[in-house]
Amino acid sequence: MNEIRDRKKLQAFGENLRKTRDSLGMSQDQVVAKCDVTKGNLSNIENGNKDFTFTTFLEIARGLNVHPKDLLDF
């Protein structure tokens, strides 16, 4: 596993996730209220500090009310 490569991908995903959330005018609290993800986990993912499971990815998309593929456009 290439940790530098993986970290860059997680950071890019996190930046895109935050931009998507901001464009929807949603706070982290609003997102986590609609899905089964903690605010701490969401924050760590947005900051590129945490790897996550596919089911967490789907939950975040549900919390944002977007199609999961929309979160992969980065």
Image: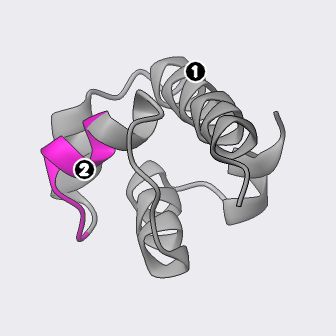
Question: Mark 1 Cα within 10 Å, few/some/many (few <14, many 20+)?
Answer: some
Under circle 2, the secondary element is helix
Q: Which residue is identified by label 2?
A: 41
The residue tagged with tag 1: helix, strand or loop?
Answer: helix
Amino acid bearing label 2: Asn
Mark whose residue sits in front, 2 or 1 = 2
**What residue is drawn where x is 52% and y is 72%?**
58
**Total marks drawn?**
2
* Residue beneath the point at 63% across and 45% down: 3
Could you tell which of marks 2 and 1 lies nearer the N-terminus?
1
Residue under label 1, please give it.
19
Span of residues in magenta: 36-43
Q: Residue 57: horizontal and vertical position, in percent?
A: 51, 65
Screen quadrant of the C terminus: top right
Q: Please say if the residues under marks 2 and 1 sit with CB atoms less than 8 Å apart.
A: no
Residue 33 found in image quarter: bottom left
The answer to if 40 sits in the magenta stretch is yes
Question: Which of 15/9 is in front?
Answer: 9
In the depicted structure, whether residue 71 falls above or below residue 49: below
